[in-house]
Amino acid sequence: MSDMSGSYPPKNDDAKSVDPMERLRRAARRHQPNPSPQLSEPAQQSAAPEPSAQPSPPPQSPPPQSTRPQAPPPPSREPQERVRSEPQAGPGQAPRAAPEGGRAPASSQPRQHTESEPQPSEPQSRVQREAPPHNNEQPRRNPDRDDPSGEIKSGNANARHPIGRVMEIAGSESHIALDLERLHQCMEDEDPSVALAGQVGSQIKIRVGKNWLLASVRTQKQDQHVAGGIMAAIDFLGEGQEEKLTGRLTRFRRGVTTYPVPGAEVYPATSNDLRSIYASDGRANVPIGTVFPTKDIRAGLYIDALLGKHFALLGSTGTGKSTSAALILHRICESAPEGHIVMIDPHGEYASAFSETGMIFDVSNLQMPYWLMNFEEHCEVFLTSYGNERQTDADILARCLLKARQKNRLAETINKITVDSPIPYLLSDLTTILQDEMGKLDKASSSVPYMRIKTKIDEMKADPRYQFMFSGMLVGDTMADFISKIFRLPADGKPISIIDVSGVPSDITSTVVAVLSRLTFDYAIWSRDEKTRPILLVCEEAHRYVPNEKHADDSAVASILSRIAKEGRKYGISLGLITQRPSDLAEGVLSQCGTIIAMRLNNDRDQAFVKAAIPEGARGFLDSIPALRNRECIISGEGVAIPIRVSFDTLEEHKRPASDDPSFSQLWNDRGGEEDAVARTVSRWRSQGR
């Protein structure tokens, strides 16, 4: 008897031995159109019997038309009408037979479709549509993303689709995996920010909940385990919210509150995102250039943050460092015409740049009184001895200098006078006191220290090179006038003073800088009861005055500049350091600079020194320092929203410093007037004047 359970063929252990391919052919044959609609149900059941070890007895119904199964068609001769059916029954079972009359119930009969009929589309998820092809499978085309040629459409399509995924998250350094094919597609994008997506120094963004997390790419390397894959190290910069209408980044703020999880998608940062990030948040700022690689996004420096926590401009010779410094100072002067800026110019480069907007002081009109020096600065100028002899000379000078200051009329109105008090005195009084002290000596004491000091003072009084400081005309009490003109109080529309020390004798140059720096600091301290007047002190060739420990000489200028770097902001003093050798600069001073503007540095030691002084999030930018063009820089710190690469604006010709490199090819082909030029030079040389 046949199995009455409704399953066909009958269940038995030998059914498993049937070839799977033969079973599929039989299943397909069972679902072919019925050639005889009048065939009864028993006849259909016997049309394709399944071989078994114990054949069933013949059914009692009328004999079927055909009891032999039809031969399966060869693979190359498929029926013209392709059949789509519902899922078949499980192994060992066949679909229920159609009732008499050849029609199955609506719930059991599979629905058939031919090529001529429109087939219903199967819903596909986004993951299925965008999943990469496996093996030889052709990728599915997404009409929202791709054009018929398979290329991604332009118009921010690259920005809407990920370029990689987050692989590892760490506090100091995280890693992402990038798709090389997607990076090549982004390179063809019209948006320059998207075109550089994933490259070293570029910005990418990661979705974390409802926010966007911005990061910069530090390094890249090929993924050895995935073909066409790239592993990249990133540094997190900050986070912002997503604008609902446009989907771009808004309300950006520095720092990270929520980190992404591994597997999060990585997207390119667009120019619109960068424009929102670098847009001013309402704080006072000065534009200095454009954000790389864009051409229209303006880069600005927040004045209060830049000056409030000091800044440093670093760059090798020939990179446009002086022009960039002049540009920044010009922008600050334009935004604050009543400011107070003092710049130490050791090479006489900036006089031509600020001839219209500032006051220029050199040895011809500086007129800095010698009595403004404190005791330490007096020792640097008047003492020539070393070791134990220097300590003896210092004791003698301190005793005589105090007596000289006490002879002034101002001393009568001041209760307490010290050796550091800025009280005018006569050099002749100092030498007279030295002579008197020497005459009081007994025969056991030596008069050599007294004579050594007196001789040095007399030499400086007679040397015309020192007249700007040790002239007999500087005896009067001109301290208030000197401070007013140097610190631009009031500014009168010229907020910057350029102190050209190129004509100052080299042996007292550092002393002159020390006096000017100390006056800045002391004035800020003693004017705390008055309305605050912040002062910016800019020091060119700063490594000459604040050297590192290897070259430290315990000079007065190094001491005062270090103190300004550490304490100046408490008293409203800002320090700007400009140098071409940052590795020769005192590490403690550079670490106090809240904003670092790094131009191209050719020396490996300088590069390593700057990287050590810059915040962690800017390391990816600093790797591109050796590849910067002239007048390009990396800015990081308090003066900008996030670390950025900036192309400086072109400065007008009359505002540029006189620091252009000479053209050898042109100047060595010109001749004429050499003899007269040599004669004039020799005359100035001998007279020690210009």
Image (cartoon, rainbow, N blue to C red):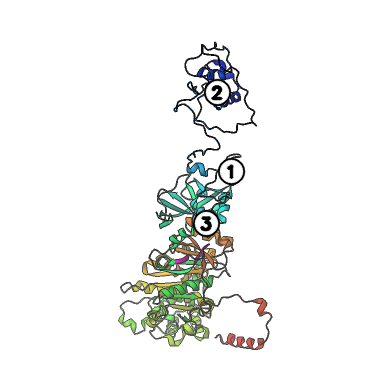
Q: Is residue 394 visible?
A: no
- Name the element at disc 2: loop
Give the magenta part as a residue range. 289-300
Image vertical order of residue 402 relative to residue 236, above or below: below
Q: Is residue 471 visible?
A: yes
Q: Amino acid at mark 3?
A: Val
The 10 Å Cα crowd at callout 2, few under 14, some 14 to 19, many 20 or more, is few
Q: Which residue is mark 3?
A: 194
- Name the element at disc 3: helix
**Nearer-the-camera pick, 300 or 273:** 273
Q: Which residue is mark 2?
A: 36
**Nearer-the-camera pick, 297 or 689:** 297
Image vertical order of residue 262 relative to residue 371, above or below: above
Which sits earlier in the primary sequence, circle 3 or circle 1? Answer: 3
Residue 210 screen position, x and y as percent: 40, 50
Mark 2 to mark 1: distance in Å?
Answer: 57 Å
Residue occupying image coordinates x 59% and y 46%:
228
Q: Which image quadrant for residue 71? A: top right
**Nearer-the-camera pick, 425 or 535:** 535
Q: Amino acid at mark 1?
A: Val
Image vertical order of residue 571 relative to residue 397, above or below: above
Q: Amino acid at mark 2?
A: Ser
Which sits earlier in the primary sequence, circle 2 or circle 3? Answer: 2
Q: Which mark is residue 204?
A: none
Q: Which mark is residue 226?
A: 1
Tell me if label 2 and label 3 are in contact, CB under 8 Å.
Answer: no
